[in-house]
Each structure stands twice: as C-alpha cells, then as structure tokens.
Image (cartoon, rainbow, N blue to C red):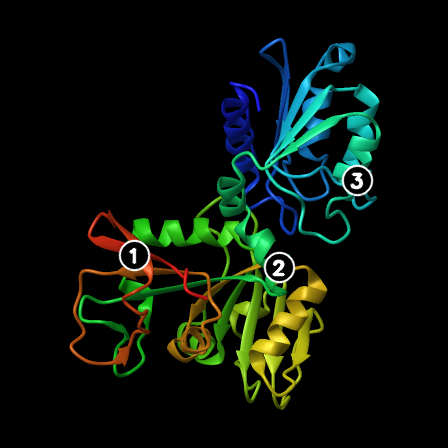
Amino acid sequence: MCENDLIYMRRCLNLAKEGLGYVRSNPLVGCVIVKDNHIIGEGFHHAFGKPHAEIEAINNVKDKSQIKNSTIYINLEPCSHYGKTPPCSQSIIDVQPLRLVIADIDPNPLVNNKGKEILEKAGIKVDVGLCKNEHRHLNRRFYTFYQKNRPYIILKWAQTLDGFIAQKNQQCIKWISNDASLQLVHKWRTEEMAILVGAETIRCDNPQLTSRHWYGHNPIRLVVTNSSNLPINSNIFNDQAETTIFYKNLIKQYPSNIDLVKIENDFLGSLFAYCLEKNIISILVEGGASTLDNFIKRNLWDEARVIIGSNIFGNGKKAPIIDEYKSFDIFDLEDNKIIHYYNDTY
C-alpha cells in the first residue's frame, strides 16, 4: 500500500454515503481516480439504475488518456455482470489504470471475486482490504442481505419517560415524540427500502407510513395481520407508496394495487422469503409492541432506535425492552432522547 492510500479510500467512503436512500438494493460505492498524487476524477453511485461509481468517476475525467497508469480507489469490487448497467470491470480495463485499490470483495454471488479476477487477468494490480471494516459498516444492509439471507432490521419506537408506548385506551404514540424527532423518523424512512407495522398500529393510528416530512423515497409499506380485517379507508391503501399485506386468513377484498402474501407457518420466515425474492435489503420496523417483540425475542434485529419523550403516562402499553448488554449511544433532540442500540451479539 502507498502512503496516501488511506486518504483516498476515506474519500471514496465519504462519497459513497451520498447515495444512502437512493441506491435501494445496490451497495453504497464511491470511486476516486488518482494520477501523480492528484485526484483527476471521482464519483459515486447516485441512484438505483444510474451509472455505478466507477463509471461516474471515469466520465468526470475530461481527458480519458490521463487515466492510463493511474490508481483507482473503489470501496467495493467492481461488478462483472450485466444488470441495470453494463459491467464496470470492463470499463476500468478499457481506460488502462496501473492499479486498483478496493476495500472489500462483493458478497453478491454474481460478482464475488469475479471482477477482481477479470481485472488481474488484464494486468491490473488489485489490492484488497483497506478500510474494510468502515466499508462493511457503511454497507451493513447490503452485507446482511447476502450473508444472512434476510433484510437488515431496524426497530424503532417512541416511549414515555416511564416506559409506555401507548395509553390504556390505546390512544397511541403520536404525541410522545416532538416535531424534531418526527422529522428525524421521516429521514430514517427515506434511508430504508421498507417499513413494517402490525395490524393494531393500522387500526389505532391509521398511519400513512410515508416520508412526507423529509425529501426522499417513500418506503414500501409492509403490514402483518392474522385476520386481514383492516379498515378499508386506512391510509395504507392510498397510492403514496407500494403496500404489501402479510395475512393468515383472508376475510375481505382489498384494492388491486395491494400485494397480498399468505403467511406460511412462520411470519418472519414468510417475510424474509418475500424480501429475498423482491430484493428488499432493509426494513424499518415501527410497531406495535407485539410486532417489535417478535424480532427481539428471536434476536433477528440489527439496530434499535428508541425515542424517549418527556411525558409520563403512569400506565398503559409497555414498551419493548432491549437487553442492557447491547452496545448503544444516546443523543438529545430538544426535549427528547434518542437511544441507538446495536445488536452485536448474534
């Protein structure tokens, strides 16, 4: 490795972050092209279906002949197959760099080491492993999907100071968190592919489950229900976002734009199978308590984001509990506290 490799790879990672919420099932990737210790081109993957980071960086070099004998830094192995875009490995070979530095091999079996091998056969030196941990944290959704065969699961709820998520009469969580926290939650929604709630949340809150208070994509709305007896005027049946209902017994008809999935024995098994089929790599689980507990009890979650409001209910529906040994961080957002747990024990 060269003296400045770390500087340029960190630049790749900073560029890659800009695609969060837009690349959908694709990884977050940045690319920097360096010649004579100067950056001559850089780019990142802007959105699903758009050119990959390597192509963006190459296109940003006015004189393509300057790329010959350069070093190209990418935080993920270049793809070697045709998908929404042509393979990036061949585009790199065409501009004849001397060396390629990548943080990690792509876990997608369509790529996994194939891109590296193609580049090396073309005479390009490939170094792997720089900033691997930082890269994997940034792309934790992508790696979870391919290595654990399930989407990355983020649990989220708001609770009072005394640990309740709803009052006794089920007047729910709308006023536990403040306006700043509400906006933050909508930002979180833009960053994940899907959002999941149980039937009681639909009946109690009639949520829209959109990202209307933050610029970005609306997540796919996922609802789990035993009876499928959901109010037909529920906001989830509007055309603001895709909606899928997981049911055990179908007792009524729903609009034709709603995707229906029958639960076969185990809800989480059916959910994960559906997500693998549809390439849904991350889910924000927003409730209710029994739905959240389903993930917690089976230890099938990756992060939990808990908003602590400043009010007290005294009684009502108890909030889920995350084990104390989980790692976490805390920050204040006006009169709310945000506790961010990380599941590092499975």
Looking at the picture, how far across and down is residue 278, in whole percent?
Answer: 70, 63
Type of the residue with mark 1 = Ile
Q: Crowdedness of circle 1 by 10 Å Cα count: few (<14), some, many (20+)? A: some
The residue pinned by badge 2 equals 147
* Dot 3: element: loop
Q: Which mark is residue 85?
A: 3
Instruction: Say if mark 2 contacts mark 3, CB within 8 Å.
Output: no
- Marks 2 and 3, how far apart in space? 24 Å
Locate the N terminus and report the quarter of the image it occupies.
Answer: top right
* Dot 2: element: helix
Q: Crowdedness of circle 2 by 10 Å Cα count: few (<14), some, many (20+)? A: few
The residue pinned by badge 1 equals 339
Question: In screen coordinates, is 304 left or right of 104?
Answer: left
* Dot 1: element: strand
Which mark is first along the chain, 3 or 2?
3
Question: In screen coordinates, is 131 left or right of 241?
Answer: left
- The image quarter containing residue 224 is bottom right
Question: In screen coordinates, is 310 left or right of 273?
Answer: left
Q: Nearer the viewer, mark 2 or mark 1?
A: 2
For the point 71% across and 73% down, which residue is it?
A: 256
- Marks 2 and 1, how far apart in space? 27 Å
Depth check: 158 or 346 in front? 346
- Marks 1 and 3, how far apart in space? 39 Å
Residue 333 in sight: yes
Type of the residue with mark 3 = Thr
For the point 42% across and 78% down, which residue is it?
A: 297
Type of the residue with mark 2 = Gln
Q: Which mark is residue 306?
A: none
Looking at the picture, how far across and down is residue 118, in whole percent?
Answer: 82, 36
